[in-house]
Amino acid sequence: MFFWKELGRSLGRHGKKTAIALLVSVALGVFLCQFAGNVAAQRHRLRDLSVNAGLRVTFVNTSGTRSTNILVYDDKLQALEESGLATPGLYAAACLFSDGTEDDQPDFRNPERKVQKVAGYTNDTPLTEVGADNVTYFDGFDASMFATDQAVCLLPQERFDRLGYQPGEKVHIQFFNGGTNERSIFPGAEIDVAIGGTFRDAGAIEPGAGMVIPYRTMRRGLQEGHLSVWPSQAYLDIPNPEDLNAVKALLQEVKINPVDKTLDYYAQYGKTASINDSIYIGTAEPTRRTLSLLQSLYPVVFAAVGLIALLASYLLMQSRREEIALQRSLGVSKGRIFAVFFGESACLCLLGTAAACLGCCLAMGTPLSALGLPLAGYVLSYLLGSGIAVSLMLRTGVLAVLAAAE
Amino acid sequence: MSILTATNVEYTYRTRYQTVHALQGVTCSFQPGSAYAIVGRSGSGKTTLLSLLAGLDLPDSGEIAFENVPTTQLDRDKYRREHVSVVYQAFHLFPLLTALENVMYPMELTGARHKEAKEQARALLQQVELPLSVEKQFPKMMSGGEQQRVAIARALASNAKVLLADEPTGNLDSENSKNIIDILLRLAHDEGRCVILITHDNDIAAQADHILRLKDGQVIEST
Ligand SMILES: Nc1ncnc2c1ncn2[C@@H]1O[C@H](COP(=O)(O)OP(=O)(O)O)[C@@H](O)[C@H]1O
Ligand SMILES: [Mg+2]
């Protein structure tokens, strides 16, 4: 009981000293809130940048454009997919197929083979680019089929009508594709594909296709015949910007040169990809550097706060040496004196911090949550500082003080 | 039986610059109900002896014993709270407490209720012949004589059996000095306390029951 009374009296009657100590703690608190607010703002900025980075690896051809064959091997796309660092965006490729209808035409390399062109897409973008009503899905089918390797297809509306197919009907086809030998084509797998819908226009990437299937269905069909898919277009998204460097390393590993697409110089035979990371790198890196610099300064800030608290407390208590000595001579234990003086410091620190905190939150809009940990650190260093000051004060001899005053 | 004894007490101040043998084998004993005067030149070790008696420090060798228990074995904070009180030449009141609060302090420290402490403090202020008007004053506003009376009242508040006073009249005029000494002597003779006071003044020393003369840290005369 008396402890609290004494604490209150000590705070109340040392008006000027209390005010000075309070001012110091408010000033330190404001300084720290500013600092923590800055760190929070940088962190926020970095998070925003990451979320909105929209990083994308786009494979380009030798002239840096994406509209013609990019000559990237499909196995390289697979390697990127399997790394988990990048998620496939739109892939587009074409190969050949035969369905035994009159639409099969003799191939120019091998007139014995009668084939037509089939397009493979990872999603229906090229089809919908033509117009919203370009594609009609039958019951039980929708655009999500392009994300799978199911045996499904879309047919040109004209072929569907002319050949008298039914929705969902299975068509037997065989894949073909050219090998490295330009003068021949080779057979892939034979599969039954269900007709999931129709389209009127195959789009700009693979015009004139007699069928459109999911890219991965094509991949499966050709791989069974030890043939490769030759994508004409591909990009992958990097959802987590932190993975940017890992993706670049992987590209290097599979011998693809990530380049600025304005620099044709580097482009070599389809081993080229461009990454739209210049804005991200230009802003995220400096932000990250600033952030880590600020964060590494925390110990210094805390040390400074502790030191200032120590000095301020020590100076203020220096003027109360006589009081402390007197208490000692009246038999007040060191522990109790420490508790009262330290309690005083703690009250002032907490009060000052609360005021500073409130002020900063109101004035600068710093969220309280961002201040939590730094403030805890601040209060700790402040209390440590003033605790050391009180302990130092308690070491001065009672006699020396009381006798000196005589 | 002695309430307080010093046996072969030695005490040395060691600073970076010098070593002072302040007490060199002091032996003396004090009875309750008597007033003792410690006299001697400045620097002879009077204050040092008093401080050791008050348990503010321990002798380097020899022992101080309160009721036959050496101060080395006492909880010296408790000892100072309950059994011994000191009055200083410079009064040493808490500057931000009123006269009444100063006197209440030792009582509240040992857990007395506010109301009882207040009543008792008032009685003590009366005992040292202070008018009621003083009780709300802060030390700054009081005269030296008033401050020393408050200091004595505070020393009595813990009901200590031993009262130590280091030149209690050193800062007072002769009239006030006389009053203070009267009060101290009465505390010894009427209340059976053991009063030990340091003084320069031979007249005051003569009023005490016993005189202890120190020189260069040794007792050269004891009556
Ligand atoms: N805190 C101290 N540090 C060093 N020397 C001291 C200290 N206090 C007292 N002394 C020395 O010890 C001796 C005795 O001092 P003290 O007991 O105060 O004498 P008195 O009270 O009789 O004047 C003196 O020589 C004094 O200078
Ligand atoms: Mg002295």
Image (cartoon, coloured by chain):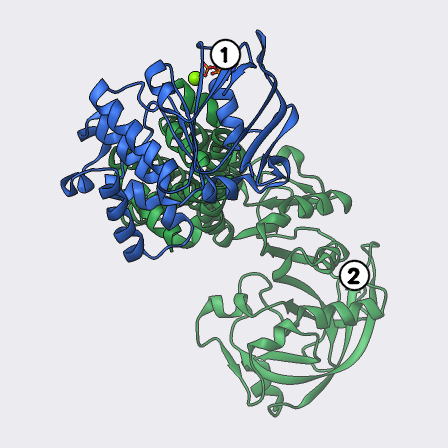
Q: Colour of chain B?
A: blue
Query: Residue beneath label 1, please?
Result: B44
Q: Secondary structure at mark 1?
A: loop
Determine which of the numbered discs, if any, sits on residue A228 in the image.
2
Whether ligand 1 has any atom under 8 Å from the Cβ at mark 2 is answered as no
- Judging from the image, what is the letter of the chain drawn in green? A
**Amino acid type of the residue tagged 1 in the rendering:** Ser
Q: Is residue B132 left or right of residue A384?
A: left
Front position among marks 2 and 1: 1
Seen from the viewer's position, the closer of residues A271 and B207 is B207
Judged from the image, the secondary structure of the residue bearing numbered disc 2 is: loop
Amino acid under label 2?
Ser
Alpha carbons under labels 2 and 1: distance apart: 109 Å
Residue lying farthest to the left in this orientation: B133
Quadrant location of residue B207? top left
Vertical placement of residue B109 versus A341, above or below: below
Where residue B85 sits in the image (x, y, percent)?
42, 36
Regarding residue A321, the answer to whether it shows in the image is yes
Q: Quadrant of the N terminus of chain A?
A: bottom left
